Image: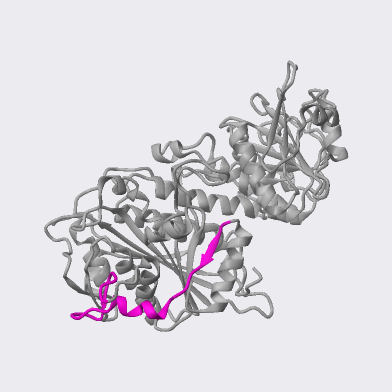
Amino acid sequence: MSPVAAVAGPDLLESRYRAPLVILTSADLPFLLPPAGGPAGPAGPAGEADGSTADTDGAVADCAVLAVVAAPVDGTVVVSDRGQRACAGVGVDVEQLIENEGFRADTGGVLVVPLSRAERPWRLMLLGVGSGEVADWRAAGAALARRAGAKGRPLVVADLDADRAHAFVEGFSLGSYRLADAVSGAPPDGDRAAATTAPGAEVAGVAGGSTGPTEAAAGELTTGEAATGEPAREGSDAAGTAGTAGAAVAAELRADRVVVLSVEQAGEPVIAEAVRQARAVADAVCLARDLINMPSLVKTPHWFAEQARRVGAEAGLEVTVLTHEDLIREGFGGLVAVGGGSPRPPCLVRLTYDGPPAPAGAAPGHRVLVGKGITFDSGGLSLKPSVSMASMKTDMSGAAAVLGAMTALGDLAVPGRVTALLCLAENMIGASAVRPGDVITCWGGTTVEVLNTDAEGRLVLADGLAYAAATLEPDQMVDLATLTGAITVALGRRTAGLFASDDTLAAELTAASATAGERVWRLPLTEEYRPAIDSPVADLANIGRALDVNGGSITAALFLREFTAGRPWAHLDIAGTARADSDDGEISRGGTGWGVRTLLAYLAGAGTAEA
């Protein structure tokens, strides 16, 4: 069957959702955002503004948000002095308000108070952060994003350290994701491509309506730095024309998704860096979500590969794409067989990242990530029921999570070398589709009897794992896949299954998932189940046949282990966690991007289980 053209779709570099711009400030009552990103006129040396002002229309915070914590012992709601002053600035006695309303500051709880004011802010929100643990701040950020609405411009007065600032910004950014924007491909307002965290950008005025620029807190970035996240370099555009940089931030500030985070330690570099990293992680998750949510009419293997090529190049990665002809020539029998029934041929994408040296004493080695990328899964000739097929545009969630994580490695300065393999194919029916009973040869020579064409993910992963183990010399291998419905039965929709041949790697991933706010549960590779995938006509069968043991997730993991050549390997079955039927905290309806945060926490841990 000859290839056919896909319907033209959006380029994710132009349309992908970016995390909201976060402005970090230590001012007590900065209810006005910077006037269009700071003065837009000409700038002097070192990016300093000349004092001119720009239009501030639309740049004022819609709501003032006070984050309050409940004391862990007696549940008393604790309000900081800064919080009390902020509320007094809009005419509210916050302690009396809490007592009158019985507000308990439960995690994610929001109390909205309309303000009788002619000027913004028009609302005051009390945001509960529970006992104030890191996970509470992440949940509170997501709750605020959903309650503030798509066009909310909150100013958040909070007292938090770097870890909690990271969690809060990450939660707010992920909770701000809008599925409709991703599916339509409509570019967000403003110049999202230029958006980076602008910690410490100058804040104009305080309550009362002053529009004059205030002095930046110690350690804050100048206007020229704010647009790029880096100091202006001699000879660069930013050094000579900070007005251009200001214009980029100005576009951001006129957009709807802006949040000012007012913390007392805003001048500390560790806080600014935490906010910057949180936005980088959120961008990576949102990229994965956009890929997952894209309809399969657009999202062919070739389209996915082109997106990987473009975003990989933007992130400084080395990208190689193996076409259908390359796969045939080099013996990727699993990918070729699974994609054989579709007029849209399969491909494999390899992305390579070389990071800085690891900290003293840590040796991360070479980590390889392998992602299942079935851009649509009809089940093949073992056709799925229509109700099961409806969500199968998300069957490439593993590859999307791997790609999303790879794009953030440079921003997070992850040490060591990381290689990713995206195994991309469309599993369709057709005259050339693989049949039940066929025997195929995967990369490296292992033969597989295909008993069920709907157990196709393990076939494309087999190619990727075997190729990685034999040619890339990995120290650790991790694959992500929406592999089995059985994992959802076992663990539900918020916990991924973890299988591992190496206890150290399993511990690292478990610790990383806890840090990231995602949840895994390790399941056994039960050796007594291994004979279930024996075949009388091939080395393996792709589903249990010889022994009826059930445990479909375990036998699938045992199948994958056969292709790892004994190297340290872990498998994350994300069939339950990769998609959601409704918004829930930082989890979005549709594709969730599950796994991006866990992979980044694991890779940034530099090979230690304490990551």
Residue ranking furthest to the front: 548
Say whether residue 81 is left or right of residue 65: right
Structure colour scheme? one colour
80, above or below 412, in the image = above
Region rendered in magenta: 518-546
Say whether residue 553 is left or right of residue 55: left
199, above or below 102, in the image = below
Say whether residue 252 is left or right of residue 207: left
Query: In the picture, which quadrant includes the C terminus?
Result: bottom right
Q: Give residue 156's quadrant in the image.
A: top right
Pinpoint residue 471: horizontal percent, then vertical percent.
38, 80
Q: Give residue 555's quadrant in the image.
A: bottom left
Q: Mark yes or no: residue 244 visible.
A: no
565, above or below 500, in the image = below
- The residue depicted at 41 percent of the width and 60 percent of the height is 399
- The residue depicted at 39 percent of the width and 53 percent of the height is 307
Query: In the picture, which quadrant includes the N terminus?
Result: bottom left
360, above or below 21, in the image = below
